[in-house]
Each structure stands twice: as C-alpha cells, then as structure tokens.
Amino acid sequence: MIPAPRLVRTHAGTLAVREWPSDGRIPLVFWHALGPCASGAELVELAPRFAAHGLAPVSVDGPGFGASPPATAYDLESLATLLRATMRELDLDRPVLMGHSWGGGVVTTLAALHPDETRGLVLVDSGHIDYADLDSARNSAPPIQWEWESRAAFTAWLEENLERPTPEVLAGYGAGVLDRDGKAIGSSAESMLRARDGLLDRLSVRWPALADVPVLLLLATQPPHVDQNREHLPRFQAAVPHADVRWVEGASHGVIADAGPRLGDEIAAWTTAVAAAGRPAHSGA
C-alpha cells in the first residue's frame, strides 16, 4: 500500500522518496507537515486518487523525518534547493508541487524561485502566512522526543487522537516512526526544532513571484487554525489574487487526514484542469 522509501543522493543532500504506483503522466511532488510521526506516507489516502486521475505522485520524507537523514541547513531556501535537486535526479519535468504545513513553506519557496519549472502549486493550510508573525510560532516550547512503549501503544494513541483513524491513515503515520528496542520512536526532536526555526523565514517576500504559477490553497475550517486563516488570508490574496482558495469543511490543520480521499479527487480535478489550461486559473474566491 505504501511504497518503500529509497534514498536519492544529490549535490544538495539526500532525501528519501516514495514513488506511488501510477501510470499517470503529470508528476506531483509532495512534502509533508511536521509532527511526531511525520513522513511522505501522509499521502497514503490521496495518492491512489491522484493516480486514478492521471497524476504520478511522488512524496518525500523531509530531512530528519521518516527514512531521510538530517540536513545541514533547514532554512526554506536550502530545503527548496534540496527538493529541486532531488526532482532533477528523478527526471521530473515541471511537476505540480504540493505541501502541507511545513511542506507548504518549502514548495512555495521553490515555486517562487523557479516558477518556469512549476506546473502548479497546491498548498494545504500553508504557504499563505508568515509564521514569524505568529506568537505561537515564535514562542513555542521546544519539541520533545516522542516514544511509545510499543507499536500497539503508538497505534492506540493514534486511534485516540485522530478524527478518522482508518487503516490507511494509521499505516501512513506508522511509516513515520522507527522501531528501536521494542519501542516506537517518533520524529527527531532536533530535526523538528530546526525545521520550525526555518519556517520563520518570511514567505510573503516570495508571493509576488507566483504571478504565473497556478495556485490552489486548501484551508482548515476548525479552531484554532480557522481564525488564524481568516486573519492572514487577505494579505496573501492581495499578493496572489489568482489563487483558488477553498475552505475544507470539517477539517482541522490535519486537513489531509481529516478530509481523506475526497480531497485527493478535488486536488486531482484542479490539477488536470490547470494542466489543460496551461496558465493560472483565476478564481472568484
């Protein structure tokens, strides 16, 4: 169900990539959110829907997460450079870039630096905010190193905390933890801290460069992120007026896990329409 990761080594560093089964011709590259069990396997419920619509999904494990080794630098431009080098090594031609939370910051930066290489940009509750303006981002407590007594204890924790603990979602998050001495070990606290610090890089300076990039922004509708989105969205829309902004009903910041396969169909329909048009699809949103 979930592709085994393989390491792709480039001049900019090493990333683990997951190439999902597909006969599609339009590449889509996904970078995941931060979290105690984060990896590119977050795409588990969406990847089959993408493939059914003619997309060829590839997800990466961010450095220090899943199967990827840590990076030397975690600022957004360095991570964007790493992702671009990985895509070139995979010979992906003008992919759609998709990111959730942390990943949205990375792919927004990459699309702005190389708009001519970007077929479209899908932002999942991310990319539209300068995190440096949020007290919660600037003053958050240092991350802890998560661990569970066993895989069974980890799964029980997931089932207690997820809105939709489907077998696929459980497997996706399960791919983001390691087994060590019988325990389930979560994402590296050090990598989490460095990634959070990198997210304080201002994205607003990148937004004007997205003028010729089709953009789909999918937003959470549950507190506290819905209030944050309402406050900060107008500034993004002023800078990127062609962005297609959609509110995902019933979704927290964990939009992908909350919405599930229907979100994959929605993203795939938008992507194929944009690919056919070949230019930004202006929205009245």
Image (tube, helix red, strand yellow):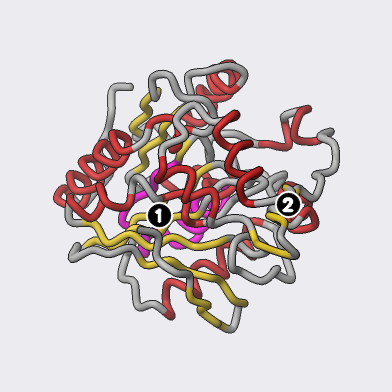
The structure residue drawn at horizontal position 51% and vertical position 79%, both measured from the top left corner, is 8
Examine the image and state in which quarter residue 144 appears. Answer: top right
Mark 1 residue type: Leu
Q: Is residue 119 magenta?
A: yes
What secondary structure is marked by label 1? strand
Q: In the image, residue 109 lies at what x, y percent?
A: 54, 54
Q: Which residue is mark 2?
A: 192
Main SS class of the magenta portion in the image? helix
Q: Residue furthest left?
A: 276
Against 233, is 271 above or below?
below
Q: Which residue is mark 1?
A: 97
Q: Circle 2: is it few (<14), some (14-19), or many (20+) Cα within 10 Å?
A: many
Q: In the image, residue 260 lies at what x, y percent?
A: 36, 36
201 displayed left or right of 235: right
> Which quadrant holds the C terminus?
top left
* Front-lying residue, 103 or 93: 103
